[in-house]
Image (tube, rainbow, N blue to C red):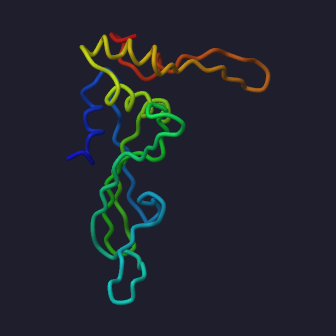
Amino acid sequence: MKRFEYIKAFNSPFKRPKLKWYFGKIAIGTPYFFPRVLDKKTRRFKPRKIGFDFVSLGWKTKWTDTDYRFEWAPLISFVFFKWQIVVAIAAPEQYHYWEAWLYYQRDTEGTPKERIEQCKEGFPLDYIVSDGKTKTKVNYYNKILKEKYL
């Protein structure tokens, strides 16, 4: 069940992610390649004809145990010959959202309010954003947290 730990984000101080649907020709990777299976006879990959792929939240740590890096969003893919149905979990400000959520989930303790305060201190999301002309200071916690946790 650790693969589906990201589901806890739906009932956390973070804004609820949305479900993003896709239906059409195979176009979405799971995560790096289009859906595929290993042909055991030839030991080569071949395109999946029918079946499901469950892709968990993709992340890694970079320099320290708490320096989280988002890689890909969780999704479920169903392939039927050359057609694909995908339900992906789309969070607001996806990179900041999942990296902060991982810190919240793995490196904080206490009540949700206390844990968010620990996040803001131990995993700050203050950035200077530029459009080429002006610079603006942005705290991404204001964009990814539910109103009562700001």
Q: Quadrant of residue 102?
A: top left
71 lies left or right of 103: right
Q: Nearer the viewer, residue 95 or 76?
A: 95
Find residue 12 and report its horizontal and vertical position in percent. Answer: 28, 24
Taking the spot 38% from the left edge, 29% from the top edge, the residue there is: 101
Residue 137 vertical position relative to residue 72 in the rendered view, above or below: above
User: Which part of the image, by quadrant, shows the C terminus?
Assistant: top left
Q: Quadrant of residue 85?
A: bottom left
Taking the spot 36% from the left edge, 42% from the top edge, the residue there is: 89
Taking the spot 44% from the left edge, 34% from the top edge, the residue there is: 65
Q: Residue furthest toward the left? A: 1
Q: Residue furthest toward the bottom? A: 41
Find residue 63 and report its horizontal and vertical position in percent. Answer: 54, 36
Residue 68 vertical position relative to residue 28 in the rendered view, above or below: above
Find residue 47 and report its horizontal and vertical position in percent. Answer: 41, 76
Q: Residue furthest toward the front? A: 64
Total residue callouts: 0
Taking the spot 47% from the left edge, 16% from the top edge, the residue there is: 142
